[in-house]
Image: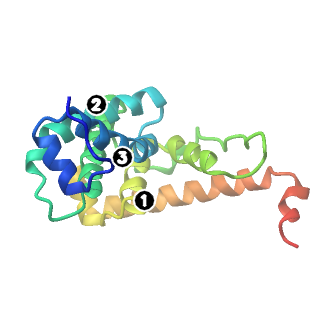
Amino acid sequence: MKTLAFPLSDAALVAACRQGNAAAQEQLYQRFAPRMLALCLRYVRHQFDAEDVLARGFVKVFWGLHQFAGTGSLAGWVRRILVHECLSFLRRRENLTLSLEAADVRHLSAPQPSADVELQAADLLRLVQALPTGYRAVFNLCALEGYTHPEVAALLGITEGTSKSQLSKARALLQRQVTALHSSLPTSYAYAHVA
């Protein structure tokens, strides 16, 4: 196996991967896997499913490197592949349907605060993961990935109005959950950081 000078530029890394260099493939995986796993966890509820989606996504990345034109960022290209893989997983395993009724979210309750009673990134991740599948997909695509409503509509096979409605409902539900979580914090914590 060839050794590589670390770290390679994106262009050099892609060229080495295209030549089948295992060290380059490992470097590409190590460069993007942590961020892409975090992305997968926003779409997929369980760690083991997110890891499966990540693995499947990287297989597609390596198989598709010959299609990477180099005109955009490598990170953005890898991210798009992983987003599409997450959506495929949701269609296969979680019955990606878009909720049109507010009644669909009645079963959700505000999660319990973490042991250190601060609203941290892990708490926010759990709130996003608790959203109904359709809400979660649209919220991630629009609010976190920056897709427009026409793009989301095309990706999910829905109307632009449905995309807007799902995003609005997801935001409203998250707001209620954050408010409920914050109100469950001890008063001493809520005012400790004001001074």
Amino acid at circle 3: Arg
Amino acid at circle 1: Leu
Question: Which residue is labeled 2 in the image?
Answer: 92
What mark, if any, has residue 144 been given in the picture? 1
Which element is circle 3 on? helix
Residue at x-position 24% and y-position 46%? 81
Q: Nearer the viewer, mark 1 or mark 2?
A: 1
Q: Quadrant of the N terminus?
A: top left
Q: Tell me where residue 129 appears, x and y as whole percent.
A: 51, 42
The residues bearing labels 3 and 2 have C-alpha atoms spaced at a distance of 28 Å
Asked if residue 70 shows in the view, the reply is yes
Q: Tell me where residue 66 appears, x and y as whole percent.
A: 8, 46
Q: Earlier in the sequence, mark 1 or mark 2?
A: 2
Quarter of image, res 50: top left
Asked if the residue at tag 3 contacts the one at tag 1, i.e. Cβ–Cβ closer than 8 Å, the answer is: no
| Left or right: residue 152 compared with residue 119 | left
Question: Which residue is labeled 3 in the image?
Answer: 31
Which element is circle 1 on? helix
Question: From the viewer's perspective, is residue 54 above or below residue 65?
Answer: above
Amino acid at circle 2: Arg
Q: Earlier in the sequence, mark 1 or mark 3?
A: 3
The residues bearing labels 1 and 2 have C-alpha atoms spaced at a distance of 22 Å
Which element is circle 2 on? helix
Q: Tell me where residue 122 appears, x and y as whole percent.
A: 61, 45
Question: From the viewer's perspective, is residue 9 above or below residue 131?
Answer: below
Q: Nearer the viewer, mark 1 or mark 3?
A: 3
The residues bearing labels 1 and 3 have C-alpha atoms spaced at a distance of 21 Å
